[in-house]
């Protein structure tokens, strides 16, 4: 646990020392939100989706750091240390989640501007769901980044896979208004349920299934990603 | 024995990188693995440092098989590429390393203080690593690798990128370690010369092992090196007229034989107009290296 904690702390310290990353991760979703949201006049609907996008971007950026750690040599020192691969992945995922949460929380505070109602329980629940989704997305990032040796390659995966994952999660438009094949993809997309849970606790429209079901699927996704990432990292 | 390698073989697909390598490193020794690039020393280093699992054979470090994760606590590793985080300070890097090795609290702080003092880094504790020179970074790396008191220190090409002053510092530090076995890889023969013993790895095999002096003695005789306007033509002529095994190495003619000083007279008399300079010397490690790696080819 000490190992996971120290790896997590390192990522957070590094993040605080690289101010440009804060702007990069928070800036892009803010511009998306402002332009698309006001263009279609639905900034309120897009609010939880943007929150998820911030989590996605933050976790992508922190997992890109795995590739950099590998290139620069830092990772080799960690890999020969007497630490289990599960602790390494856990440290990396917790660090990414902590960074994602910091930025997500800043954005959450903008909610009342677009009439997202404030409620203590709602927001506390939102923070919990953000942590859950952030954990899953960071674990997914670790899983993808582990085998890559260039940041360029990872960018391709990000555009071909991660951005569509977000677009088809109900973050931008609800499934019931989509074309049938898109709707099928959206229902199959585990991120859809994280978005749904977050939208509900922030007072938005819900998918026709119980909140517990959405939460359960989101949690199952996070656990599955963590197990897969650890299994991937175990191979010497 | 601090390092015991027996019949170690490693394949990357079809390519055999290590082919039945066996050798031992005694406790407290400074031992070098020497060899041309692609000779297998990096693969061997990766196996000993637990970064790679060997295809077959055994390797034990500090008495523990390298396939057993328990070995990790007993070894310190200095990779060729620095494994420091440039955005963190010297102290933070060491703290992080200590945590990974299960150290914490006041005990860890004390160890960090001791290692930084040993390498003259105490006043750099709060400096960001990325702001330090290459030589200082290498010292931080050494301090870090010794923090958990390993029994065996493994270093991959440790003097790469260091200027001569920093290289000397590094060697003073390595020779000054007490009670730690040091195994390093290098392609610099003058560096191997400073070690207690060395092994030459070529095409995945150990082709020579021993003390630098002993290995040089094995070749015997003297090495005569001749500078000439046309080294190739001179070498051919020496082989033809004097019947000596002359070879062209780095643009000079080189041959080894007993009583080199007597041969020089004959040489100069035979080819007065061809010779710019002649030196007679005892075999260097480079000569050992050339002769050992050649035997395997022919």
Image: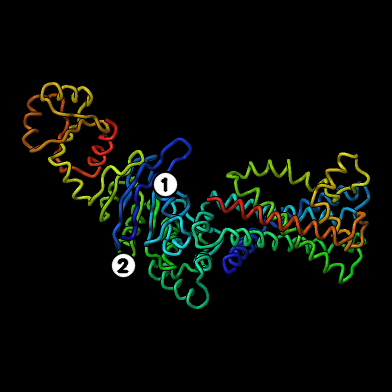
Q: Give residue B131's position: percent from left, percent from top.
A: 51, 59
User: In the image, A198: left or right of A5?
Assistant: right
Q: Earlier in the sequence, mark 2 or mark 1?
A: 1
Q: Give residue B2's position: percent from left, percent from top.
A: 33, 60
Question: Of the numbered discs in the image, which one, if any, rests on residue B178?
Answer: 2
| x 30%, y 62%: residue | B27
Question: Of the numbered discs in the image, which one, if any, rests on residue B11?
Answer: none
Asked if marks 2 and 1 fall on the same chain, the answer is yes
Chain name for mark 2: B
The C terminus of chain B: image quadrant: top left
Above or below for B204 versus B140: above
Neighbourhood count class around disc 2 (C-alpha, 10 Å): few under 14, some 14–19, many 20 upward: few
| x 63%, y 42%: residue | A152
Neighbourhood count class around disc 1 (C-alpha, 10 Å): few under 14, some 14–19, many 20 upward: some
Residue at mark 2 to residue at mark 1: CA–CA distance: 33 Å
The N terminus of chain B: image quadrant: bottom left
Q: Nearer the viewer, residue B274 or B8?
A: B8
**Helix, strand or loop under label 2:** loop
Chain name for mark 1: B
User: In the image, A136: left or right of A149?
Assistant: right
Figure quadrant of residue B277: top left
User: In the image, A171: left or right of B112?
Assistant: right
User: In the image, B219: left or right of A222?
Assistant: left
Q: Nearer the viewer, mark 2 or mark 1?
A: 1
Colour treatment of the image? rainbow
Question: Of the numbered discs in the image, which one, if any, rests on residue B56?
Answer: 1
**Helix, strand or loop under label 1:** strand
């Amino acid at each position: 646990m000490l190992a996971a904690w120290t790896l997590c702390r390192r990522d957070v310290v590094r993040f605080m020392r690289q101010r440009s990353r804060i702007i990069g991760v928070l800036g892009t979703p803010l511009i998306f939100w402002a332009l698309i949201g006001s263009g279609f006049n639905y900034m309120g609907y897009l609010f939880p989706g943007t929150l998820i996008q911030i989590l996605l971007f933050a976790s992508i950026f922190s997992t890109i750091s795995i590739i950099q750690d590998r290139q620069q040599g830092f990772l080799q020192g960690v890999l020969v240390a007497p630490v289990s691969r599960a602790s390494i992945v856990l440290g990396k995922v917790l660090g990414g989640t902590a960074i994602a949460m910091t930025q997500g929380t800043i954005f959450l505070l903008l909610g009342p501007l677009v009439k997202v109602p404030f409620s203590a329980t709602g927001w506390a629940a939102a923070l919990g769901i953000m942590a859950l989704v952030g954990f899953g997305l960071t674990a997914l990032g670790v899983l993808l980044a582990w085998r890559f040796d260039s940041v360029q390659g990872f960018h391709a995966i990000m555009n071909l896979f991660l951005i569509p994952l977000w677009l088809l999660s109900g973050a931008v438009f609800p499934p019931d208004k989509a074309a049938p094949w898109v709707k099928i993809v959206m229902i199959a997309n585990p991120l859809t349920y994280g978005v749904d849970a977050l939208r509900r606790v922030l007072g938005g429209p819900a998918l026709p299934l119980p909140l517990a079901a959405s939460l359960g699927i989101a949690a199952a996704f996070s656990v599955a990603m963590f197990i897969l990432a650890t299994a991937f990292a175990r191979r010497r | 024995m601090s390092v015991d390698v027996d019949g170690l073989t490693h394949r990357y697909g079809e390519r055999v990188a290590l082919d039945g390598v066996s050798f031992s490193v005694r406790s407290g020794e400074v031992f070098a693995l020497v060899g041309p690039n692609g000779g297998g020393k990096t693969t061997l280093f990766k196996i000993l440092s637990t970064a790679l699992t060997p295809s077959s054979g055994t390797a034990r470090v500090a008495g523990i098989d390298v396939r057993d994760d328990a070995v990790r606590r007993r070894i310190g590793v200095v990779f060729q590429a620095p494994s420091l985080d440039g955005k963190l300070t010297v102290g933070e890097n060491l703290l992080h390393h200590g945590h990974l090795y299960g150290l914490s609290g006041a005990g860890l702080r004390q160890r960090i203080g001791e290692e930084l003092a040993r390498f003259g880094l105490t006043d750099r504790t709060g400096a960001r690593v990325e702001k330090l020179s290459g030589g200082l970074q290498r010292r931080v790396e050494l301090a870090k690798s010794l923090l958990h008191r390993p029994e065996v220190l493994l270093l991959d090409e440790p003097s790469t990128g260091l200027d001569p002053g920093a290289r000397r510092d590094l060697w003073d530090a390595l020779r000054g370690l007490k009670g730690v076995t040091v195994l390093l890889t290098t392609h610099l023969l003058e560096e191997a010369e400073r070690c207690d013993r060395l092994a030459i790895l070529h095409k995945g095999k150990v082709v020579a092992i021993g003390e630098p002096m002993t290995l040089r003695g094995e070749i015997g005789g003297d090495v005569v090196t001749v500078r000439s306007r046309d080294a190739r033509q001179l070498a051919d002529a020496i082989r033809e007229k004097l019947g000596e095994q002359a070879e062209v190495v780095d643009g000079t003619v080189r041959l080894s034989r007993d009583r080199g000083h007597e041969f020089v007279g004959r040489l100069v008399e035979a080819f007065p107009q061809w010779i710019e300079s002649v030196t007679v010397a005892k075999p260097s490690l480079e000569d050992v290296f050339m002769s050992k790696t050649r035997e395997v080819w022919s």
